[in-house]
Amino acid sequence: MLSTGTPRVQLRAHLLASGLAGDVATSREAALRSYRAFAARDPRVTLGLDPRWSWSERDLIALMSRRCGVSADPACVGGGDVIDPELTLCALDAFAGRLGDVARRRAPVLFGTGHPHRLLGFYADLADAVSAAGCSVLTPAQGRCVDITTRFGVRTHRLVYVRGVASLYEKGARETGAHSHSPLPVRVALQAAAEAGGPLPELVVGDHGWVCGAGQLGIEAMGLADTDDPALFVGEAEGRVSVAVPLDDAVRPEYYRPLTRYVLNRACLSQ
């Protein structure tokens, strides 16, 4: 039995207190809409993944129950979603294991996020740590324009790296990155790296289209995902995503700091 003072038990308490796991802000209705859209292969939800298997809404509910802890009852159609903190902790352990392995090999890594307002700091601290361990943190296609389809039509964005982490900035915007599910940024970054003669990343770390887009291209990828992001968990089930960590991906940025410390300690990358 673990004592109440262990980092794992402390992090479990933090996950519940912060809403990262346990009762989360994502609604059951929103999650079910995503599952139906994924079953219909809506590209806004598949995030660059081309599923090998046929996934029905019921299949996805069952998968997300196993991987996240949401209700397995298809008749449950309302209320808030639930993430099992034990599943989050186990996934974080696996995430840290892969990060530590890559760091020991000093392999090149690419970081990218579709949640720059919330998750940039989490990924940036990981990027700093693997860089200090001797990894190349790649920044291909810096400043490259990417046309993204939004609910307002096609908008031109720039691919910008902040502390080694890529995200999209709407053209003309200087201060804040844009929320995006698109796999186009990682495709642009990987194509630029290949055209420059490499190196290509051995691991892509991020969320949304960064993970699914890289995994679809055969590059190891892992990241964070909410209960309305089934694509990462499908990718994990089909063997194209190494680790999908279930948690609320839109809480306050400072709530992710204990996760950073936990991952770096488990990966033996703490400074």
Image (spheres, rainbow, N blue to C red):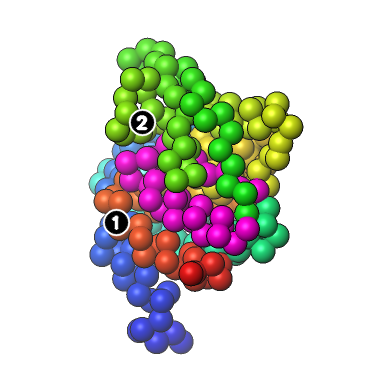
In the image, residue 140 sits, relative to residue 201, either above or below, namely above
Residue 254, numbered label: 1
Say which label, 2 or 1, has the lower sequence index: 2
Q: Position of residue 58 (x, y in %)?
A: 49, 41
| Vertical order, 155 against 82 (above or below) | above
* Residue range corresponding to the magenta coloring: 108-134
Q: Position of residue 36 (x, y in %)?
A: 44, 32
Label 2, label 1: how far apart the Cα atoms are: 19 Å
Q: Quadrant of residue 20?
A: bottom left
Question: As shown in the figure, which amino acid type bears the numbered disc 2?
Answer: Ala
The percent position of residue 104, horizontal first and vertical second, equals 67, 64
Q: Is residue 109 in the magenta section?
A: yes
- Magenta stretch: dominant SS? helix
One can see residue 21 in this view: no
Can residue 124 be found in the magenta stretch?
A: yes
Image quadrant in which you'd find residue 12? bottom left
Left or right: 249 as drawn, with respect to 25: right
* Mark 1 element type: helix
Q: Position of residue 179 (x, y in %)?
A: 36, 33
Q: Label 2: state its secondary structure.
A: loop
Q: Kindly identify the amino acid type of the residue bearing the numbered disc 1.
A: Glu
Q: Which residue is mark 2?
A: 178
